[in-house]
Image: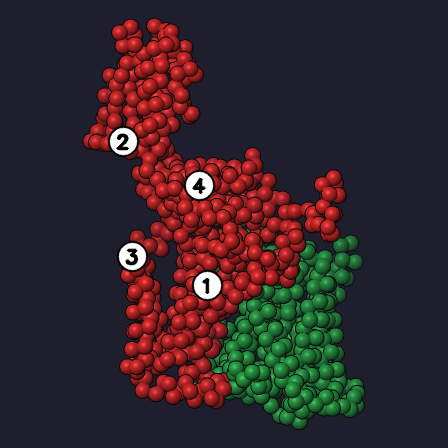
Amino acid sequence: MIMDDDRISTEQAIALIVNAAVGVGILSLPRVAVKSAGPDCWIVVLLGGLIALFGALVVGGIIKRLEGRTFVDYISLVFGRPVGLILGVVYGIYFTLIAAVVLRGFAEVMKNFALEETPLEFFVVTLLVLSAYLIRHGLEPMVRLMVVNFPFWFIPSVAMLILSLYNADFSELLPFLRTPPEKLLQGALSSMLSLVGFEVLLTSAQGLKTVKDVNKVMVVSMGIVTAYYTFVVVTVVVSMGIAETSRTIWPTMAVVRRISVPGEILERMDALAVALWVMVVFTTVCAYYFAASITFTNVFRAREFKIFDSILFPWIYLAAMLPENILEVEDWLKFAGNFSILTCFLLPIIILVAGMARDKWGRKG
Amino acid sequence: MGIFDTLGKRKKTEIFFERDMTPDKNRKLYKDIDENLKVFKEYLADCDDLIIREFVMGNPDKTKHRMAMINIDGLVDKRLVHEEIMKSLMLHARQTPLEHSVGDKFLQLIKVGLLTVAELKETDNFGELVLAVLCGDTALIIDKLDRALILNTKGWEKRGVEEPQTESVIRGPRDGFTETYRVNVALVRRRIKDPNLKVKTVRIGRHTRTDVGVLYIKGIANPSIVEEVLKRLNKVDIDGVLESGYIEQMIEDNWVSFFPQFRRTERPDVAAAALLEGNVLIICDTTPFVLIAPTTLFSLFHSSEDYYERWYIASLIRLLRFAAAALAIAAPSFYVAMVAYHPGMLPTDLALSIGATREGVPFSTTVEALIMMLSLEVLREAGIRLPGPIGQTIGIVGGLVVGEAAVRAGIVSPIMVILIAINAISSFAVPNFSVAIGFRLLTFIFLILASVAGLYGVMLGFLGLTVHLVTLKSFGVPYLSPVISFKFTGLRDLVVRAPLPSLKERPEYTVPVDKTRMRDSRVKERGGGEENDNG
């Protein structure tokens, strides 16, 4: 009626990308960064942010060329219908996979830190049901939830990490820049995988109110994400040390466990931190779940995306439950990471270049 | 057909229901008074409260103008009928030279020159006439004339304007709405003396024929919201409307939600403030509760006093309310989650003392909390229903004696008693009772979630709650506005209340036509005020 056009403003788009990007990475990124670059871990994250920003701007370039078309329609226009459909399906599978992997990673953490005896399926199903219910209502309510929830996880998480600085040792970040450049780059690539999330905007681009501001959206959101992750990595490393960080699966949780609250209200914060972290995961899952449903809807040119909301539900669940143990989960995470290099960088670059070429020479024929 | 089918259908039907409240509008009046009276008696057969008074106008010896006056006993102001109608027509008319033929001129003379009633109108059909009589007007039927007069003589026994019972304030006006529609509209009009304050009345209820008024300020309220309210009101087809709660539930957006999609108030100042913010009022006859639409979650936490007090105090009180709301929803569930699932989170000393007090309590913390919460709900309900002094006694007996005895008997632990007491008190710190009662329900749901999955359950509850709230709308306005985007303009009057001179714009959620609320007129220094008067 009044605001019911299901379109999002520039600020809301920023919220969407930030929430899609910040997810399971909070817990594992410090380890990834430290493993590849030791004391230069924060440079690795910053570099990763730069690379991600490049990908984001490419995606922004594509979004500017959509001109009201869906992403799948645009690829079909550039490469022809069959290729367009195949690429659409690839993106759909990618989004589904990421949603599943994030869910599984979340369930593992929950089992480890909060409720040891609860089966993994419980966590996966409860969160999946909630997100399925939310995305049925469309893009705008989903983004609204991300905006509403943002202060609830952002402020406490920053506060907790600041509290953990009571025994910080900043000399852990020395020596400065002793890592060989190729190792830095390699680390940047692997840490970048925690920073992606901008690709969900590709499929939701139709819901953008102001497409011309898309570069601003990308820059601001990637800036927020990179700054936040750098902060996380630095606080974790300085309060726990290089050696320990590289040996812990979820170093951030280990740091939070050690916090003592001023005033002795709570003795340990880990359960609380995990509970807050659920919000972060939830928004990420929603963003990818929504992107997957929209992509498949566009591929099959269905009128109602709610059908794919229901169709995808069992598949995400199955994909999330597929790995047998935590090691396989790690393998899946790696696979999903490599997949995201394809979908966030290689394919967008190809599509953008092809689209530009088509604009320049294609119309003559 | 189940409940879901019926409710589902209501949303789908687009047909405007012809809600013609007047029976037999096509049935015209006769010229003969006896025949008219016969029809009238048919309509209102077996209505013993009907009064029909036949009389002759002016001097009974000279003229033969038969008339009849019809009204309902108890609904009319007797003094008005005696002094202004009967006296005028029977006594004062003797001094007026009367026409012998009854016709338009004669009617005009009565209307303009004789009847000293403030409001009257003419009608030519029975439908309107009967309805008017039932509404408390007096019908005047004249022989040899196929038209009748409707004289406004409404005046039944009614409660005066008193201090509202449910929304008491320390600072602020003391008058409250009453059960009479016109009085309520007047109370608002008295505050907003603006021709742009519009009042549109619809009649709802096939049998009750209740007046329902829609008030808004043209030029501030968004026309599409006004239209939507009127459209939804016109769709309502129900046998009776006894309270604005009927209207509320018939036209709200989401009937599943725990959250009211209207703000309701007993205070004219709150209603006027809402109008000035661009809201639409729905005033329903026979109830002092006025509905305000659209509504957001945050506006339910605001009280009129917030704007009368200085802003520090107002902001602090508002923050307190939000904190109380959080306690009201989550306190028991948090406690249960920590004690049952994450005892490691508690400081050791506290954990030990909780353990010591729980010694000998046979139930789990969840059951303990449920026992206490349920008995508290029963106490609250009993306290409301019983007459004043006994209600207080119940509070003391229930709260102190039973609570103490339960702890002594080892059914509940003392910490639980403290917790539930704080929880209950917090829930009543929320100014709006319908929200508070919704929170009580949520407390139970959160408690069960916490007992199933600890803090994760609480978080699931929180997420579910926010998911529900972001999808909820009140007349097309998002329920959580203005917290829907990363824009911070709306935050000045939300959780805190910024100084009044800085609230230059109306809140966004009503999508007002005219956004500006005030110009910069603050007196910067002493004596600076005169300049503003000139400019």
How busy is the neighbourhood of tag 1: few (under 14 within 10 Å), some, or many (20 plus)?
A: some
Residue at 29% from the left image edge and 6% from the top image edge: B62
Q: Are marks 3 and 4 on the same chain?
A: yes
Q: In the orientation shown, which residue stands out farthest toward the front?
A: B526
Is A150 left, or right, of B70 in this rendering? right
Chain shown red: that is: B
Cα distance, mark 2 to mark 1? Answer: 45 Å
Q: Secondary structure at mark 2?
A: loop
Residue at which label 2 appears: B73
Q: Secondary structure at mark 3?
A: loop
Disc ID at residue B429:
1
Residue at which label 3 appears: B387
Find residue A52 and report its image quarter: bottom right
Is B439 left, or right, of A49 in this rendering? left
Q: Position of residue B428 (x, y in %)?
A: 43, 63
Q: Earlier in the sequence, mark 4 or mark 2?
A: 2
Nearer to us: label 2 or label 3: 3
Q: Are marks 4 and 2 on the same chain?
A: yes
Q: Position of residue A225 (x, y in %)?
A: 67, 73
Q: Earlier in the sequence, mark 2 or mark 1?
A: 2
Nearer the observer, B148 or B410 = B410
Nearer to us: label 3 or label 4: 3
